[in-house]
Image: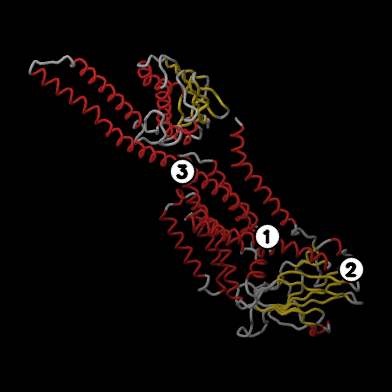
Amino acid sequence: MDKQKIGSILRRFLLPALALLLVVAFLLYCEGRVQTEFPGLYPQDGVLDAREVDFSADVYHLVNHWDYYPGQLLSPDLFADPASAPEKDNDAPLNATKGTWRLRIQAQPHTYLSLCSYSIDYSTRIFVNGQEVRSIGYVSDDPAQAIPKGRYVTLPLYFDDSGETEILYQYANYMHNDGGFIQHTLISTPENIDEYQRGLSLNAMTISGGLLMLCCYFLFCAAFQRNREYAALALCCLIIALRNQFFFVQHLLPADISFSIEYRLVILDVSWIPMATVFLMAAFFPRSAGKKPLLVFACLCLVLSALHFILDTHDLVLLCHICYYTCLPFALWFLLRLFLSFRKQRPSALEGIALLAILFFTFMLIREGMATGSNSSVNHFGITPLAMLVCILLLAIVNNEKISRQMAQLQEERQRNELLLQMNATNNDFLRTVAHELKTPLTVISGYAQLIERQMLRDQLSEKTPERLETIHSEADRLAEMVSKLMDYTYGKAKTAEMNAVKIDELFRSASAIMTPVCDKKQNVLIFHNDSAAQLHGNAELLLQVLINLIVNASRHTDSGQITVDAKDNGSQVEISVSDTGSGIAPEDAPHIFEKGYSTDEGRGLGLSICADTVRLHGGELSLASTGPEGSIFRFTVPKEVKS
């Protein structure tokens, strides 16, 4: 494999792969800043004894073993007298529309700690040591007065001389089937909690924010290029970016937005994850989707999306499950048709990478679906954003490579078309010129033939008759040469410029069969010599036309000499030279011989110009290597055919 081929592979595959690895490494660093495994602290009978815990060493998960009072909104003063305190019911199901949670924490006196977690969904009121410290929404016994809301909460805790702190949560839930429960709660020193939250913010802003920026980029690409793959990528970026509620709810949505709309948007986003995955699969593998199934699926998605804003909030979780179940048969149908198509036609490397990326994301999606509901962290943050970002980067690389190949093909086709148009224009110009020049020998031949015919009829042939017959013969030869030249110039007209493997020996045999009689007329010997074992990547007819034009020019300026055509390897190309032992080219003419319209022998000055353009189309260059009294040497290069 030559250096140019290795360089091409580096540019097309290794460098994008290296860039992808660097991006993934940075994203994994951001992901690693978010601690996911925490040692647990387990309260007993609503009391957490943390006096022996070293909070400076780690962040701890405060397990939800709080005292539970379902159906009651209790104030802290009711617990002042233990004898008259309300009865707890820790075994009650979490389906009450309102209730109270209570926990007492014991730590070293004069200690500062922090709690962080999401508030109880729907509405929450928080008391610390009998003082209300946070109200999220509005908690009320009256459903008409309750204002639902959910937010991420950080609570500073100070342990005085007693070393004990009481935390009391009230909640009201009138919009969901499940009651309020304590979310995944972390406790540690303020410094550790701050470090955890900085990592949480970095991860959310980098991944979710990055996905939104990618969404904008892909959206512009889809709009300007009319590309369905970019449109599907833009949709997936948007859906997965909003999957992280810390980013979506805390940072993106306005603070005063209605919780009902906020809740519907969050559920709609989760419902759209499998839908977007199916659209992504259909965009990159349209032959597996089919127009009618995809149209039916799109209509179902629109109906299900509209239902998120029509149905009661109590039914939204069930609707989300229905969305997942609806996507499953379509996804299986698309995959089945895709694998059946792969049996008929082997997938390309790009198709294989795209399929693996989508299957990887689908696997992560299934993992998230199985953990949702049982893992509060997955509920709020998800595990698909990072997977989706890696998947999208892979698919973007695949799509860019496909577009690059299409652009290269279009550029090559454009160059071919330009050359063909140029050749057609040149041929038309040549036809007009030759048609004009043909009149002169035809007029001479016709005139002398008529004169001799009249003399023969009168039996009065003159002494000049042989001379006139010689003139007719000479003009006929000149006419034949002009017709031959016309055929040479129009040889490739109306031909396609498809590039294929061209055998050098066959090319030389064709040129020899055509040009040997032409060279014999001037007693020139035509010799072909091939030192290359490679094949050319080009168009056989166009390359043959180049050889014919160069040999014709060499024979025109050579008498009783030798014309030699050589081929030898030159790196990734083959160098072909046409040399003669003729009179050479004048020094003042040499710099201009490739210019259109420039001629040294009253010709049209088009042959060498066409040859240079043809060689340039093949990715090579035609040049005058040397010239002088001992002859001239023309050289041109053609790329070798690369074995796949």
Identified at 60% across, 51% down, the residue is 393
- Whether 417 is drawn above or below 535: the answer is below
Q: Which of marks 3 and 2 is in front?
A: 3
Number of the label disc, if any, that sits on residue 37: none
- Whether 609 is drawn above or below 390: the answer is above
Q: Quadrant of residue 15?
A: top right
Where disc 1 sits, the SS reads helix
- Horizontal and vertical percent for residue 173? 64, 77
Disc nearer the start of the sequence (2/1): 2
Where disc 3 sits, the SS reads helix
User: Which residue, given by chain and number where applicable, does mark 1 sit on?
Assistant: 206
Instruction: Name the side, left or right, on which 161 lies relative to 215.
Output: right
Asked if the residue at tag 1 contacts the one at tag 3, i.e. Cβ–Cβ closer than 8 Å, the answer is no
Looking at the image, which is closer to me, 47 or 257?
257
CA separation, marks 2 and 1?
Answer: 38 Å
User: Which residue, given by chain and number where applicable, does mark 2 sit on?
Assistant: 51
User: Which residue, given by chain and number where applicable, does mark 3 sit on?
Assistant: 341
Looking at the image, which is closer to me, 429 or 205?
429
Say what amino acid the circle numbered 1 marks.
Answer: Thr
